[in-house]
Image: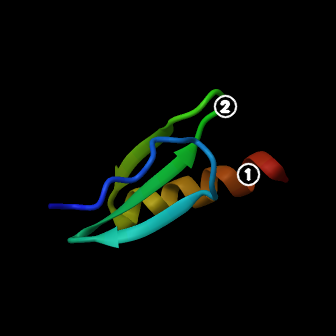
């Protein structure tokens, strides 16, 4: 049986490599997490967009 983990939004932003892609887990206000699967190209595009947004 797999270990059960509590479903909370507490914790850091996480990015892990799973298979051919990257999985990003973003904690949300009010609990829970936003889970997004990205390719390496999409991760690079996100990096560029975030850099432009913060100056």
Query: Residue drawn 41% across and 45% down?
Result: 35
Q: Position of residue 42 (x, y in %)?
A: 41, 56
| Above or below 30: residue 13 | below
| Above or below 40: residue 37 | above
Q: Position of residue 21 (x, y in %)?
A: 29, 65
Asked whether 1 or 55 is in front, the reply is: 1
Q: Which mark is residue 52?
A: 1
| Above or below 22: residue 36 | above
Local crowd size for mark 2, using a 10 Å CA cut-off: few (<14), some (14–19), many (≥20): few
Report whether 1 appears left or right of 17.
left
Query: Residue drawn 50% across and 56% down?
Result: 45
Query: Residue drawn 55% across and 47% down?
Result: 26
Residues at circles 2 and 1 in contact by the CB criterion of under 8 Å: no
Query: Residue drawn 40% across and 53% down?
Result: 5
Q: Position of residue 51 (x, y in %)?
A: 72, 57
Q: Earlier in the sequence, mark 2 or mark 1?
A: 2
Q: Quadrant of residue 40?
A: bottom left
Report whether 14 appears left or right of 10.
left
Q: Quadrant of residue 1?
A: bottom left
Residue marked by disc 2: 29
Q: Residue furthest top?
A: 30
């Amino acid at each position: 049986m797999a270990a059960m983990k509590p479903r909370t939004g507490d914790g850091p932003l996480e990015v892990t490599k799973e298979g051919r892609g990257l999985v990003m887990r973003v904690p949300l206000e009010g609990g829970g997490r936003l889970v997004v699967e990205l390719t390496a190209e999409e991760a690079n595009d996100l990096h560029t967009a975030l850099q432009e947004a913060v100056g």
